[in-house]
């Protein structure tokens, strides 16, 4: 790699630290490693280049010479065409968390206890149920321990035998020697299928799986204040675990049906209340619907259409908290679309008392009057 930029090869800046160098090499080596690109000459060459760059930049003495002279070789010969990986001592350290010890793939036992799968359930609620909370009973189907074999998968009176090929691990190690070193990988045992044991006589009820499908009814206490999109986790109510692992969880997805009167916004409730032009002008006491029942509210005279007033503490309870939101009532002043003669006369009197001209109501301008009064 004479006359090549090691920093550019690893894709790092010239002031990169040790961890940054290691991270860059790890990323590139995973991508171009020969084991992941069998028969790919271009990937192999790229891997060699990255290895060479790493060997220099990860060594403070070599890096110092390279930065000063453009080569890390004391005699100036460089690394031209080098394919010697005998000095690739940092490989195991860098890839230890990915390939496991000795440069091989992870040998972590995949046959140990594993948590069961999680389940989901969509629960529909009425608006009032979501406000005050409710107890619901739901029915789910899940995998549970087979009642006949106790989860062993073996016929009653028999027991599974440890696999003699993998020793109960469920995996076997495959060692490969290449020009780049010795590499090990773990693969599923082909004799036991990764279970770690062999069942000579499977249970007739579960056919050797150790599980059976069962319908279960579960009672749920839904707290007041829940809303659409909320999720309630029920720990341990999911699928059975593997190899003695814990059961999964059951997640309840809340769906709340809309209400014809109440509109929810966070913990607040919004509604509209219609009153007449006369009541809006003179003031009145109205009956307002709330989730707790009807309440009375005094509307002051001169209230304009669109005015909003608040009923404190009449909103939605806060889930797992204290207090409630508020209810906001928007006043809508209804303007009549048509008037009878008596109403027209009364309105004319009101307009005259207000100093407004009623000349526009002459019979000669009836069409204009009809338009104004909605006739």
Image (tube, rainbow, N blue to C red):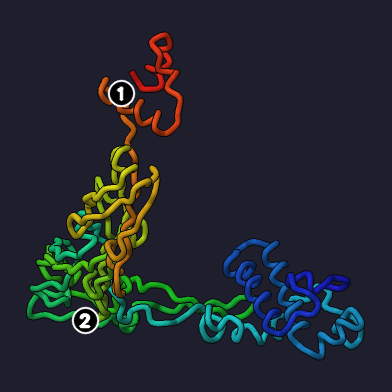
Classed neighbour count for the residue bearing mark 2: other residues with Cα under 10 Å, few (<14), some (14–19), many (≥20): few
Q: CA distance from mark 2 to mark 1?
A: 102 Å
Instruction: Give the percent coordinates (x, y) of residue 141.
Output: 17, 62
Give the total of numbered labels: 2
Mark 2 residue element: strand
The reply to whether residue 111 is visible in this rendering is: yes
At 51% across and 83% down in the image, what residue appears?
A: 100
The reply to whether residue 125 is visible in this rendering is: no
2 or 1: mark nearer the eye: 1
Residue 161: give its label: 2
User: Is 353 displayed left or right of 238 in the figure?
Assistant: right
Instruction: Give the percent coordinates (x, y) of residue 92.
Output: 59, 85
Classed neighbour count for the residue bearing mark 1: other residues with Cα under 10 Å, few (<14), some (14–19), many (≥20): few
Instruction: List the residue tagged with mark 1.
Output: 345
Q: Are marks 2 and 1 in contact (CB under 8 Å)?
A: no
Name the quarter where the C terminus is drawn.
top left
Mark 1 residue element: helix
Disc on the earlier residue, 2 or 1: 2
Which residue is at the front of the view, 286 or 102?
286
């Amino acid at each position: 790699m004479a006359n090549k930029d090691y920093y550019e090869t690893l894709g790092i800046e010239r002031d990169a630290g040790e961890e940054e160098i290691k991270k860059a090499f790890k990323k590139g080596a995973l991508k171009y490693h020969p084991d992941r690109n069998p028969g790919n000459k271009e990937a192999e060459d790229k891997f060699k280049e990255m290895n060479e760059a790493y060997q220099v930049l990860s060594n403070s003495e070599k890096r110092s010479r390279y930065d000063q002279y453009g080569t890390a070789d004391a005699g100036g010969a460089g690394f031209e065409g080098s394919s010697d990986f005998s000095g690739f001592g940092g490989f195991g350290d860098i890839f230890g968390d990915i390939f496991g010890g000795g440069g091989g793939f992870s040998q972590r036992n995949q046959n140990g206890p594993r948590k069961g799968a999680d389940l989901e359930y969509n629960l529909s609620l009425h608006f009032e149920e979501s406000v005050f909370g409710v107890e619901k009973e739901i029915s789910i189907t899940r995998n549970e321990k087979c009642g006949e074999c106790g989860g062993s998968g073996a016929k009653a009176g028999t027991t599974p035998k440890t696999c003699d090929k993998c020793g109960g691990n469920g995996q076997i190690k495959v060692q490969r020697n290449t020009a780049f070193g010795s590499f090990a990988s773990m693969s599923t045992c082909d004799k036991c299928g990764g279970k770690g044991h062999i069942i000579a006589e499977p249970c007739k009820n579960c056919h050797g799986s150790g599980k059976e499908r069962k319908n279960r009814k579960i009672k749920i206490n839904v707290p007041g204040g829940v809303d659409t999109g909320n999720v309630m986790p029920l720990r341990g109510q999911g699928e059975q675990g593997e190899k003695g692992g814990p059961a999964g969880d059951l997640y309840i997805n809340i769906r709340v049906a809309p209400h014809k009167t109440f509109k929810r916004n966070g913990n607040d409730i919004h509604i509209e209340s219609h009153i007449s032009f006369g009541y809006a002008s003179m003031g009145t006491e109205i009956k307002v619907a709330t989730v707790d029942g009807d309440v009375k509210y005094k509307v002051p005279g001169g209230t304009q259409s669109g005015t909003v007033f608040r009923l404190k503490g009449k909103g939605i309870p806060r889930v797992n908290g204290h207090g409630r939101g508020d209810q906001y009532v928007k006043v809508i002043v209804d303007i009549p679309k048509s008037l009878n003669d008596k109403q027209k006369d009364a309105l004319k009197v009101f307009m005259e008392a207000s100093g407004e001209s009623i000349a526009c109501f002459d019979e000669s301008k009836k069409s204009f009057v009809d338009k104004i009064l909605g006739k």
